[in-house]
Amino acid sequence: MMSDRPASEIVDFDVHTDEMLINMGPQHPSTHGVLRVALRTDGEVVTEVTPHIGYLHRSAEKIGENLTPRQFLPYTDRLDYLAGMNMNLGWALCVEKLLGQRVSEKTRHLRIIITELSRIASHLVAAGCYGLDLGSFTPFMWTFREREKILNLFEEVCGARLTYSYITVGGVTADLPSGWLGRCEAFLDQFEPVIDDLHALLTNNAIFIHRTAGIGVLEPAMAIDYGCTGPVLRGSGVDWDLRRDGEPIFTDMYEGYTWRVIASTGGQYPQDHPYPPVPPEAVLGDSWHRYFVRMLEVVQSMYLIRQAMEKYSRAGGVVDGPAQVKAKLPKGEAYLETEAPKGQMGFMIISDGTPVPWRVRIRSSSFCNLSVLPELCRGVLVADVPSIVGSLDLVLGEIDR
Amino acid sequence: MTELLTYFLGPIWPAYTIAALVQCALLLVVALCSAAVFIWLERKVSARIQDRLGPTRVGGRFGWLQPPADGLKLLCKEDIIPAAADRPLFRVAPYVSFCATFCLFLALPFANGWVALQLNAGAFFLLAVAGLEVFGVILGGYASGSKWSLYGAMREAAQVVSYEIPLGLCVVIPVLITGSMDLVEIGNRQAGWFYHWYIFHDPFMFCTFWIYATCAVASTNRAPFDLPEAESELVAGFLTEYSGFRWVIFFMAEYAAMFVVSGLGSVLFLGGWNGPIPVASLVGLSGDPSTVAGWLGNLLGLANFIFKAVFGVTCMIWLRWTLPRLRIDQVMTTCLKYCVPLASIMLAGAMLWTFLFSGGVGR
Amino acid sequence: MKVQDIHARLADRFGPWLVAQDFEALDPWIEVKPEGLLELCRHLRREPELSFDLLNCITAVDYFQPDPKKAAQVEWQPHLELIYHLWSLAHRHRLVLKVRLPRWRDDQPGQPPEVASVSGVWNTADWHEREVFDLSGVRFVGHRELRRILCPEDWVGYPLRKDYEMPAEYHGIPSR
């Protein structure tokens, strides 16, 4: 029956001490939320890792069966709460797919500005917290300082810093305030040197490379087999990004934009922005590459935002507002996956013709990314487990929903 | 001081006792004040590195009353001992650590002749007693009854004990050049302009200083070698179950140890109480410290020493907030594969240099 | 490759097991009988021209209307539907598989229906099937370790079912 999968092996060593069963979490400084990782260790060497989730389960899918799509929007904010705009976009596009609606050009460019800023904010948290997990406290402060500026921009747009509910079914809740584009551009201009600072403090740092290079190597075939997506998949060298390869309703949003998918092809990353050389100890698919893909994606997001700001300014017409609250949904089902910062985020809505959906399904990227953790942590040291968990960039909000 | 008291009191043993108690009290004040100052310094330096300000309100503009405020808060905390803990050992562990560190102050010279115990094996005494601090940590980790604390304790044991080897090798080199283990002697040998400092004595001493710096940071459990207290992996390592006053004692032990290794490094390599420009002797304040002029010159030397020690501690703080943490096997690799061979080579090189160029040992 | 062509390719080998299909839907789907699911999935994964190597999502939908008045108006019979979303990274085509299961095995309430586990074909299914078992009550035969994933281990009931009643208390904590 189980022909394709090997049985779980326990790594065996020559010298044995007593086996210890330790719990990392659910309250733990570096498990990125309420995640419980049960470690079985022989001294400092980990022989088995079992993640336990469900501490943040808030039955979002059940709640979705009682609310109209517009009413359900705030619940999507709370899934990946570090990138709320991307979650809003995923849900809005899924419902728009069911309704057969397309937003105007101006709205499309606006959505790109907002979601790519959210992607930068999410990757900043990932990089800063990754440094924090490894003992480097300063990059955490610097990345959160930059994230504060993005959150201030979002606060001007929609009034919220974390749970936006801004991109809604049919469009956005409000247009940009005056002068916002100028402030956004000012932020991007002062942000570029900060990326170089982060490279100096983390990417190039010998100790950081020692702690991440060659740790938690994920083979591309295993990544696809376990359903890993996003930077975890691209860090293993698989050239797949939904903004280019996804469904038309999502890829059409990025039509007319020039940008590059960050995946290593032949050992080289896209070279349109100076970045530090790949260290020789780094193996494709290890924690360093997953972290590095996020750093390069930040730069690509900056390019996208600049293009989008210019297209938005030139676009005519108005920005679409939200659809009707009590509109009846057409019968049918629609499933849409979008490229969220942490991976492919899927929303499914099954409607029976009433305003309230019959079933809402949320396919979270971190759920699948976490499922590969037991494979990555065989035979590593205890200190490597936070390094691997941090490189997967998990958010328990979307794992547990 | 003993002679003074003997004059008043008659028999010699009360004089010794009172002199010892006074000096201990003085050094205890120094240790506690240094801990308080370093806590404030750490918060301010780390804040500036992280692009923020640090404490600014407690006690005025610079938050200088923050350490006493924190100390007061910690004193008022509830005394929690975990149910699974070994109670007597749990209670004793912080004091073991602090006593070991405090004893180091007894042999550390602050200026020419200003040392509580002028031992002719001062360097040896300091190295030996510094190794006792690890007992407190292991006791604390074991007695907490928590697996995470045990991890921290085991890592600490491996790390500190291993780093004593290269640390000892680095300390031996200035001792070799001086021909004496007496720290006061070593300090006095570096009197004069800054090129008399041992760090400029020969290229091997220069490299030795940096190896000593690495080993000193490792032996005091500061980042990048702070695995025993690794916040993000082990919650707080061996400190996980300690709160309130006991935690204060552990932390005072750590900061006091930082001051001592920094001070020892300055005595061994950076001239100790001798400034880069011999101002005191130029102005005419040098000489026997029992004379008024000599005593004033010594005061200047004390200022020099404290400045160098505090500067060393500031560099340790700077390192902590810049670099990530090394894994335990990388820590041990650094010690056994890099520090020990390098220190041995420096030892051989320094011996050769003094033999060839300075005409023998002890010059 | 369009779903019609995929269906044509599968028809000769799996014809008897392909119950229904809809190529005009927003996400074109093919319904397969529960007995043929594992074999079909293996074929979809291994066949070089199909090569569905990414299993995106397994969803369970409970088609049951608890309100008797509305139940009279629906056109379907109460059943449980499993939806598998498959993608191929190599050929960039997508497919949706559906499996119709009875709501309870042998019509005994409380006994979850059974279907073969595809976690041997895609490891993604490991956790997704645990979640479907946990929340919708479908037992996957051949799964490595089928236990609850989001709810606590000793939880009773399958929350996403339409006739689910929240227990009055859990270990002394009142829930209503």
Image (cartoon, grey):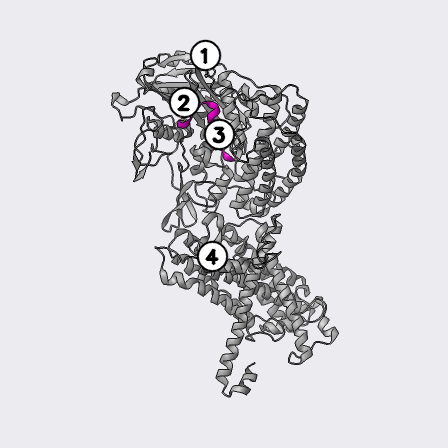
Per the model, the C-alpha gap separating discs 3 and 1 is 33 Å
Which class describes the residues within 10 Å of circle 3: few (<14), some (14-19), or many (20+)? some
Magenta segment main secondary structure = helix
Is residue A73 found inside the magenta-colored segment of the image? yes
Give the magenta range: A62-81
In depth, the one of A235 and B118 nearer the eye is: B118
Q: Are marks 3 and 2 on the same chain?
A: yes
Image x and y of residue A327, in percent: 47, 17
In the picture of the structure, the residue carrying the numbered disc 1 is: C23
Q: Amino acid at mark 2?
A: Arg
Tally of numbered discs: 4
In the picture of the structure, the residue carrying the numbered disc 2 is: A359
In the picture of the structure, the residue carrying the numbered disc 4 is: B156
Per the model, the C-alpha gap separating discs 3 and 4 is 48 Å
Q: Within the image, what quadrant is residue B209 found in?
A: bottom right
In contact (CB < 8 Å): disc 4 and disc 2: no
Per the model, the C-alpha gap separating discs 3 and 2 is 17 Å
In the picture of the structure, the residue carrying the numbered disc 3 is: A74
